[in-house]
Image: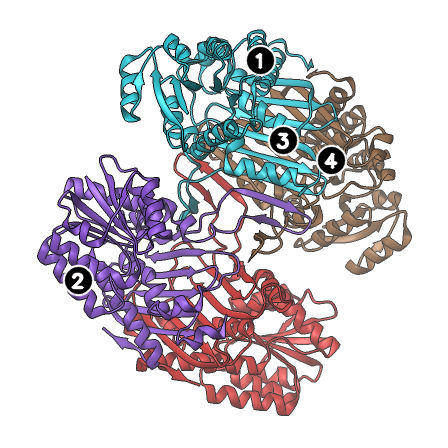
Chain colours: A cyan, B brown, C red, D purple
């Protein structure tokens, strides 16, 4: 199966590397406004460089990977829908909920397969915790605590175009919430602060947040985040049910423990998302082509993208207007 | 130094046992409406039984331990203040914030020493985490996550008279919040659910909660609780600062690890508060008499009792009225 | 029940403190060649000071605790046997195996109760691991790995009179071996080195050892020790059976974990034996008086003391003569 | 660079998969007496099948991977040396120490690069522990404890041709010993037992062992192994120095922790060597081609293969003849 990728940056390289390992899948075209990046990635995988129009005009290309900047996602999804090509798209669908909904409608009308890149669901630890929850190990989920912390804030220039912390960073956590608690949000309360760098506040954003979601069945989801965990990328959740608790913990680079006169110390968590979610990205890509080949459902479709965005928007409103938002 | 204790129940026995181990301290009188309990505890420690009036009329008694039912605390504190006796009182001061404030005023007028029993501050793990925070190990505290879960709900009869989960159970967590974040609350948001037993809802209470407190400096405190953690008493907190994180974890009865074909398993946490906080209760009593002897400040005074109650009341209001409460 | 204690040093104080907490037990006399130590300990517990002869002549004293120097143990045990008094004696029985056997014979002839102080069997973690092994959790024990490391070597003056590392330090580990593998040793191989301080070699001793014991049933026991674990007192064992493994780990002073830019670090193990085995010593004393009161067997009798000494002697021979010793 | 692989079995597939990922490296020929296996593996990687003679006659092939049965290793190494091709050979060099030494001589005469497959040195955890030891984190190594346990014994037919547990299984541990303690063995003592299956004894082998090695500098190395760890593949070591201890622990498939009314449980270790050492095998292959490309030394050369075998032979003798073997 021939494929094309939009975006040859950091995440594009990851996806291209995973894509070419899928049996029977060929990366035919790489598209990126930066010609050097596109050429380098194309050369690495025996592909050619091309244009957006060229890709959508090429009937031999049956699937596209969208790893370009956020503001291009919606257009590319809609064009892929129009061209009848399967889509693997990085999160988010769009920063506008209305636009994301339009995309979802286009995808459904066209009947194309579409995966939105919530790769955490494919992380070995997160996926195992979910599977054991579904298998009934702790009974029904009642409460979920999500800890999601980055090792450091991105540049302020990035933050300006990011859509804010709730759409940029917590979008993943909202998807985890939906996946684990398996219920619709009834109310969302979000608060946040600028504690790490005043420049974050200068662009109308916050760098740490606490979000509480109450579901229609009365289940409770609590998310805490910060842009700056000095000790690294901290990605955990714990879910409590009537029969116990499942905790999904961090991964460490090695299992070395050092005992000295000072302390007993172990590795910090994997540095950041490229390291922690390396296997998740690989699993996600394999899942996509496996589902395409078998015609089975894709685990995180465009509706999941829309619903996570809806929660991000509700949280943004709650924080800005200092009120509880009902959904 | 002669002392008396009010209350010969579960917690009264703990306090009496710790009291008699203090050098130079004698338990002279035990008071309890249940004569058999009073006699048994008095006999165990070579004390006599007595009455409230008798204790306050006995000039040789210089300190009293109040471990009787919650509705007696305020009266006994006020009488102790009037009699000029030092007070060691179990939490809470009272279920009414107004009444608690009256007590605080009485204590201050009388100039008596008064300790309110937030024993968690004396837990070796919690105290070490606090000391290391204060010593600057992770910089200023920015965010606090408190996990506080009981192994099972008390009888509904108890719940009716408990003042509700925020005053009964989270009062300790509000004190931890004040101690660790060291800042005043600006807003409180609380939500909760009845997930374990409908009878809890029948008496107008909830059995699990999520509380978010934003402080005046913008620090964030998040508390999650449940009355039913099937795996036992789960008492942890983690505090994040600019330079890292300090986590205060559970204690286990033993350090045995079993590896079998199924899993690698360790002990559950200590069963409940009497086990987990055994050393905390002992340290707390030693601190009380040490402070009395040296005339040094008591770590958790009546103002701490009042302020934790104020937060509990704000949380109760937030939950009942489904709104963010400003303080 | 009236009792006396011989020895008011470090371990004597521990035992005295535990002894006076036993219901119905009174510490009547403290004996120590150092009059000031004896007086101080006696005063602390409301006892008087006395002499060895006085204690054995006092018919009201029914049990003695021997916590004096090693070279006095055998005499005191024999005198206690002659006087018909129960004995709680610190390890070892004696540095001479022949003399220890004489003591054992005297104890048996007299029919007195006698506990030899292998307190590790009363440690909560070690005792739980043993109980679970006996309950069949991992099937029959096949292999045992004992890690036993001190935080630092004692003064060379102490080492000279210690009987050597095998009798002084590993005697506890030989008892653990007998307790856990529950089989007689067939062969012993021991080697050791002076790696920490040449002075240790100067007095004909070693400071780290590796000992392998093969039992009559073919089970394997391996012990590794060092006098200097820079990170503290390291006391662990793991036992493997057909169905799995049980590990008995170290205890830590607190459960604080610190995550910083450097590492994730936890407390070192409890500093040394007085801290790690605080509860073990208390449990051991309670067991002694409980067994006396009920007439039930004592968990570590004089034969256990003799047999651990026999293994220590075999190990010493193996190390000195560089050969495998058969028993 | 063109390459060939001998052996298309379990480990051959692993190596082939890693080989084709090296930049600039092509797998040209697959050789295996089983034609179907050879064809399948060749097809998977776009190679052809061939013969031993064909490979050595093909001047375009510059390196060979030897992943065939142990009894073919020495011949193939010698033929590669004669043909001037670089060698990547699975352990062991041979079951005969004399033959292995001949191979080493041939390799040296020919001046070819030769890697012997002690992949554990490339495991992220083991490699990090070694690097930190070398960097001086705990001072000089003084004592090493190696735990090396398989999840289950191989079929007795395999054991017959395996060379015995010391050459088959502990050969890796002897290499770890040499790598970590960085000193020559002075004495070896080995004992073992048949505890899991009498059939193991029937072919003159044992299924669990304890080995003690004393080095020329007096350092102590202790290895404990069993063929049957019911809980999985247990691969750890700990090294003690004057300033502390470094422990290299097991890897787990996920970081899920489950807390229930029974216990707090985590994953068992990775199932077996293919899982645990997946990254080690990949790193090892990358190291081989990187060293070839740069002309830098190979981490584990044929001398390492010979020396580990020498220790295995000494251990076998010690066990069989029940004596301490001096080297």
Please check whether the numbered discs 3 and 1 fall on a single chain: yes
The residues bearing labels 3 and 4 have C-alpha atoms spaced at a distance of 27 Å
Please check whether the numbered discs 1 and 2 fall on a single chain: no
For the image shown, how many numbered marks are present on the structure? 4
- Which part of the image, by quadrant, shows the C terminus of chain B? top right
Above or below A130: residue C194: below
**Residue at which label 1 appears:** A104
Name the subunit of mark 1.
A
State which quadrant residue D78 falls in: bottom left
Tell which tag, 1 or 4, sits nearer the viewer.
Answer: 1
Structural crowding at the residue carrying mark 4, measured as other residues with C-alpha within 10 Å and reported as few (<14), some (14–19) or many (≥20):
some
Q: Where is residue B94 in the image (x, y as percent from the top left)?
A: 79, 31
The residues bearing labels 1 and 2 have C-alpha atoms spaced at a distance of 66 Å
The residue lying toward the viewer, choosing from D293 and B74, is D293
Name the subunit of mark 3.
A
**Residue at which label 4 appears:** B169
The residue lying toward the viewer, choosing from A93 and B144, is A93
The residues bearing labels 3 and 1 have C-alpha atoms spaced at a distance of 23 Å
Please check whether the numbered discs 1 and 4 fall on a single chain: no
The residues bearing labels 4 and 2 have C-alpha atoms spaced at a distance of 74 Å
Q: In this view, does B195 lie to the left or right of D218?
A: right
**Residue at which label 3 appears:** A180
For the point 66% across and 76% down, the residue is C3
Element marked by disc 4: loop
For the point 33% across and 71% down, the residue is C192
Q: Earlier in the sequence, mark 3 or mark 1?
A: 1
Whether pointer 1 and pointer 4 mark residues with C-beta atoms closer than 8 Å, the reply is: no
């Amino acid at each position: 199966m021939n494929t094309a990728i939009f975006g040859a940056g950091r995440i594009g390289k990851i996806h291209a590397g995973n894509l070419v390992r899928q049996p029977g899948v060929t990366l035919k075209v790489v598209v990126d406004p930066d010609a050097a990046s596109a050429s380098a990635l194309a050369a690495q995988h025996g592909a050619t460089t091309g244009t957006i129009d060229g890709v959508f005009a090429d009937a031999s290309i049956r699937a596209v990977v969208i790893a370009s900047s956020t503001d291009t996602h919606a257009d590319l999804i809609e064009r892929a829908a129009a061209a009848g090509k399967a889509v693997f798209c990085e999160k988010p669908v769009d920063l506008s909920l209305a636009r994301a909904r339009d995309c979802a409608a286009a995808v459904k009308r066209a009947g194309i397969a579409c995966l939105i890149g919530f790769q955490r669901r494919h992380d070995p630890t997160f996926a195992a915790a979910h599977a054991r929850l579904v298998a009934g190990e702790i009974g029904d989920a009642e409460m979920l605590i999500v800890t999601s912390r980055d090792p450091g804030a991105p540049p302020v220039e990035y933050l300006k175009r990011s859509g804010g912390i709730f759409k940029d960073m917590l979008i993943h956590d909202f998807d985890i919430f939906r996946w684990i608690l398996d219920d619709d949000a009834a109310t969302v309360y979000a608060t946040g602060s600028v504690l790490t760098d005043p420049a974050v506040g200068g662009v109308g954003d916050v760098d740490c947040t606490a979000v509480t979601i109450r579901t229609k069945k009365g289940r409770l989801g609590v998310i805490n985040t910060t842009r700056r965990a000095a000790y690294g990328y901290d990605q955990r959740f714990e879910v409590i049910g009537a029969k116990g608790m499942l905790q999904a913990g961090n991964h460490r680079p090695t299992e070395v423990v050092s005992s000295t006169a000072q302390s007993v110390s172990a590795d910090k968590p994997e540095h950041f998302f490229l390291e922690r979610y390396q296997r998740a990205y690989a699993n996600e890509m394999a899942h996509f082509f496996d589902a395409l080949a078998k015609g089975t459902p894709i685990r995180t479709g465009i509706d999941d993208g829309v619903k996570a965005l809806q929660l991000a928007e509700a949280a943004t409103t709650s924080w800005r207007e200092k009120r509880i938002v009902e959904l």
